[in-house]
Amino acid sequence: MEKPITFLCEDCELLGILNMPDTPPKRGVIFVVADGPQYRAGVQRQFVTLARAMEKAGYAALRFDYRGMGDSEGVHRGFEHVDEDIKAAIDALLVHCNSVEEVVLWGECDSSAAVLFYAYKDKRIKGISIANPWVRTEEGRAKTIVKHYYLRRLIDKKFWKKLFSGNFRFKDSLVSLWQNAANVLRLHKRSTSNQNTTPDIPDSKQPLPVRLANGLSRFEGEKLLILSGNDWIAKEFQETVNASPLWQKLLNDEKLERHDIPGADHSFSTKSSRNEMVRLNLEWLKSW
């Protein structure tokens, strides 16, 4: 059964769509929407596909718009400030489906960050599933561009053909490469000391990867991480992991299951990558 519901977050009315299996479920999954303007196709369609698959597998699934997004009331706060919205969604799920004993949060891109910011604060949450987490920093973006764009172009036949044909804007590309490389060098020293420690108290002035590592380290439940093979955001996340012993330790946690989907783009837009993403989520949910 699929039905719309409304619920309050402080003084704002939020809209959600609840999928309920025929048999009262013990576990429910809440989808946290990605930040910024969204379209009903693309990533948001993945929510529909995955929610219906979860219903069929016997889980409740709630997808909702937090304040200022979609059809919900209120002022848009951004993914770093939606703790109360997620809490309200969990409350609503438990009201409409009182058989649920365990809650799982699902997030993709910057909604993965929202999940990590909140999950450890709410003991009702027993698992989190995150895909292509957003860990954007100026250094991380520059490093990803240098490594995965410029170096890849050097082995691309089309690049050399364009270069020797005289249709290549060499000066502009060289300036861009130099700027990104300089950013990596300039920011690396500043960020290194922060990447390897978890602050006792989350600090909004800390780099985003450090704050997310803090959230992940404090969450004691089950964890699923899915990374797309053809996605700049996933590559930036992997670069963050490669540079941080703390992140490497967190990803080696026995309660964390990681899967990479080669060829998948950011929103799992092909049928094969979408089916694989759904399969991995369902198998993970069944495993604990």
Image (cartoon, rainbow, N blue to C red):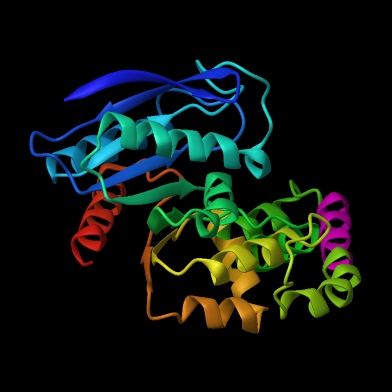
Is 177 included in the stretch rendered in magenta? yes
Instruction: Provide residue 222's location: percent of width, then percent of height.
Output: 37, 66
Q: Is residue 12 visible?
A: yes
Q: Which residues are magenta?
A: 170-182
From the viewer's perspective, is residue 191 above or below residue 171? Answer: below
Asked whether residue 156 appears in the rendered view, the answer is no
Task: Please tell me which residue lies in front, 95 or 213.
Answer: 95
* Residue located at (46% from left, 82% from top): 252
- Relative height, residue 154 to residue 87 (above, below): below
The vertical placement of 273 against 33, above or below, is below
Q: Is residue 162 left or right of residue 89?
A: right
Q: Quadrant of the N terminus?
A: top left
Left or right placement of residue 107 versus residue 113 in this view = left
Classified by dominant secondary structure, the portion drawn in magenta counts as: helix
- Residues 267 and 109: in front is 109
Which quadrant: the C terminus? bottom left
User: Where is residue 253 shown, x and y percent of the image?
Assistant: 44, 80
Front residue (pair 230, 40): 40
Which residue is rendered at x = 62% and y = 68% of the image?
213
Q: Is residue 142 above or below residue 265?
A: below
Q: Is residue 282 left or right of residue 119?
A: left
Please state the horizontal and vertical placement of residue 134, each as a whole percent of the image: 60, 53
Q: Is residue 10 magenta?
A: no
Q: Residue at x 20, y 44 (%)?
A: 59
